[in-house]
Image: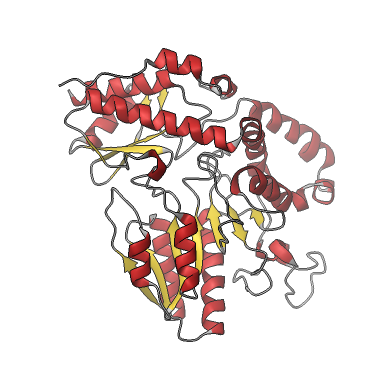
Amino acid sequence: MTIPIQSSAADLDAADPLAAFRGRFAGADTDLVYFDGNSLGRPVAAVAERLAAFVHDEWGGRLIRGWDERWMDLPTTLGDDLARICLGAAPGQTAIGDSTTVWLYKLMRAAVDHAVRTDPARTEIVIDTDNFPTDRYVAEGIAAERGLTLRWIEVDTSEGVTADQLRDVVGERTALVVLNHVAYRSAWLADAPALTRIAHDAGALVLWDLCHSAGAVPVALDEWDVDLAVGCSYKYLNGGPGSPAFGYVNARLQGDLTQPIQGWMGHADPFLMGPGYTPAAGIRRFISGTPPILGMVAMQSMLELLEQAGIEAVRAKSVALTSYAIELADATLPEVTLASPRDSALRGGHVTLHHGRMREVTARLWARDVIPDYRDPGGLRIGLSPLSTSFDEVERGLAAVAEALG
């Protein structure tokens, strides 16, 4: 049975208040269908000129003077911009630099060391079995280093961690809870404020991985009383391949945590070059080595677009895009099952469709310039970056999936 489509792509694009933003991304005017914005966002077209100006004027013109004039402070000034535009956080709590993995290690290790120092009975890290692999690997390594135990939450790969599941495992032994705000596989959108309260009621700290939500889903770190958060900038923040990650440390914890990778940039006086390490005040103490300034330049352009659009409007477009993708899949892919929440209030910015042949289908689609990605078991992930994706692109892409499965 064919399910009627409620609206045409042309009508949806015509009514889209954010449609004009699509033309500000490089490559968006081609016939290529890009369904992987939740892995690597398209570049903002203005980045080419911005990078050229940086190379000529700042790097080439100012040379090492650039550190004194702007670059030294960029990890925290850009961090404050990110916090204001996307994270719901006051200034002085967010810094940019290092990779996601390094930030996860620094903040997880700092959190468990603080917890154990405060209460030696807190010897467990709570994490779920479908958490992003890097998070799980880092947690395993820290547990081995510190003689701690991992307490696993078993979750369905088409869902995510619920309040009841977390409540069942946290307790007086819990040092740290590590959770994804949006599950990388299913797009399950966790109830962050409720889960944070549950962790706090048990006396534990909580670290949120925002990699699949920052820039697509509104976040309110201060309002939710989050302790720690980490996220990348190459997905919905469109910073480019390998662009630096960010870390958030709630102001109430900054003086209590000892970050484990003590580098010169986190020193109270980086140019003192003295024999001992004295941590800088505030969020700066969580910076380790020389920050990747070039990697921050592209991110500035995307943050400007997000501020112009407004994160709530971006979220509304994201919900509309993913809902349309599900509607098309229901109508044209009867043999496919939805491996993401159908309720948009429980769904982040992507949709996963399940079929036993999706690995093969993904390869076929890539060969014809339709670019989703594949995640086991049998999941075709459709990542729809709101400002650079049109409804027409979604329609063309889902038609290509139907052909590849046919």
Q: For residue 323, which quarter of the picture?
A: top left
Is residue 249 left or right of 335 when viewed as pictured? right
Q: Position of residue 9 (x, y in %)?
A: 40, 16
Q: Nearer the viewer, residue 338 or 400?
A: 338
- At x 23% / y 42%, what residue is drawn? 378
* Placement of 405 over or under 102, stated as above or below: above
Q: Position of residue 105 (x, y in %)?
A: 52, 65
What is the total number of numbered labels drawn onto the structure image? 0
Q: For residue 25, which quarter of the picture?
A: top right
Q: Position of residue 65 (x, y in %)?
A: 84, 47
- At x 63% / y 39%, what residue is drawn? 299
Q: Nearer the viewer, residue 100 or 335?
A: 335
Q: Nearer the viewer, residue 380 or 371?
A: 380
Is residue 261 left or right of 12 when viewed as pictured? right
* Placement of 171 over or under 152, stated as above or below: below
Q: Is residue 371 visible?
A: no
Q: Residue furthest bottom?
A: 120
- At x 67% / y 53%, what residue is drawn? 291
